[in-house]
Image: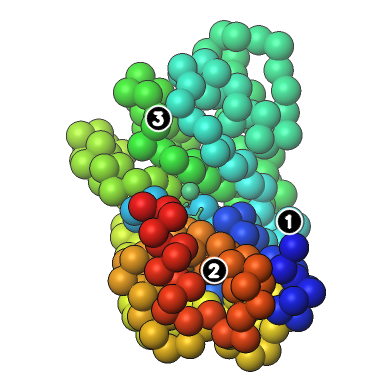
Amino acid sequence: MYLDYWGLKKFPFENVPDPEFMYYAKGHEEALVRLLYIIKRNKGAALLTGEVGCGKTTLSRVIIKQLPEMDFDIALITNPSLDPIDFLKEVLHQFGMNSETSSKSDLINLLNSHLLENMKAQKISLLIVDEAQLIKPGTFEEVRLLLNFQLNDRFLLTFVLIGQPELQGIIRDYKQLDQRIAIRYHLNPLGFEETAEYIAFRLNKAGLAKNVFNGQAIEDIYQYSEGVPRKINNVCDIALLIGFSIKAAKIDADIILKVIDKSL
Ligand SMILES: Nc1ncnc2c1ncn2[C@@H]1O[C@H](COP(=O)(O)OP(=O)(O)O)[C@@H](O)[C@H]1O
Ligand SMILES: [Mg+2]
């Protein structure tokens, strides 16, 4: 593959939510600060939306990495399109508990006592639901009820709901849930300067200090990707491969055009 040719230690443009490769664009930085605030202050619920490929899932992994295990008990649900009972079971499972029961009230009691234990141990219980636009309507009711878990005005469970833009509208229909959202943040794609920095940053992280993409190449990547990191990754990865196959010294606009032609 092209790693040796470009002098890279790792693949720089893999589409995996690896916190090591996190580039803090202004939006990602702002979202991170706000979400951490809600989580650390135990403020109830937060909503993070954004178009596909903008970095929501990656950001969730960064957040989890930043919260010390000693102080936080975290359940992450990445595939929430479940019926209410299975959803509750999955929440429990992600909190490290497996139960045989399929009785809703038993499951809720189990969860409640787990959350109380965490509170006694001064741990914050955090539930992160990714792709939350896929939550089924009946299950949304359940989520709303989970938010009611509180003791002496303290929330027993902090929520971060992450999803595609339509999630904003979906939540608006669940008035009580909607009112509990303390912070909403919409993650936008990268700007042009950020796209250039993003490319240089990821090359650097992968072991290549010089930027092998020339200016026109970066402009074309921006035009094509509209600043969406997932699309930038796709173009850059194939560009490095084509560059290697034709023994190019730099990635220029011709190479980018070849990539874009093929993926259209
Ligand atoms: N801020 C960022 N820094 C580094 N890589 C990012 C960033 N945002 C997105 N990516 C990359 O783009 C890919 C798609 O992002 P992802 O977090 O899966 O987006 P979403 O969950 O919004 O669809 C990720 O696998 C990751 O490699
Ligand atoms: Mg995602």
Instruction: Point out the tag, 2 or 3, that comes first from the N-terminus.
Output: 3
Q: Is residue 110 visible to the viewer in this orientation of the structure?
A: yes
Mark 1: secondary structure = loop
The location of residue 111, given as percent across then percent down, is: 60, 29
Q: Quadrant of residue 131?
A: top left
Q: Disc 2 vs disc 3: which is toward the camera?
A: 2
The one of 99 and 113 positioned closer to us in this rendering: 99
Q: Disc 2 vs disc 1: which is toward the camera?
A: 2
Label disc, if present, on residue 135 of the rendered structure: 3
- Residue type, label 1: Glu
Q: Is residue 59 visible to the viewer in this orientation of the structure?
A: no
116 versus 71 height, above or below:
above
The location of residue 194, given as percent across then percent down, is: 41, 80
Label disc, if present, on residue 239 of the rendered structure: 2
Mark 2: secondary structure = helix
Which residue is depicted at the point 44% across and 55% down? 262
100 versus 248 height, above or below:
above
The location of residue 154, given as percent across then percent down, is: 48, 49
Dot 3 crowding, Cα within 10 Å, few <14, some 14–19, many 20+: many
Q: Residue under circle 1?
A: 69
How far apart marks 1 and 3 lie (CA) works out to 27 Å
How far apart marks 2 and 3 lie (CA) works out to 37 Å
- Is label 1's Cβ within 8 Å of ligand 1? no
The location of residue 58, given as percent across then percent down, is: 55, 58
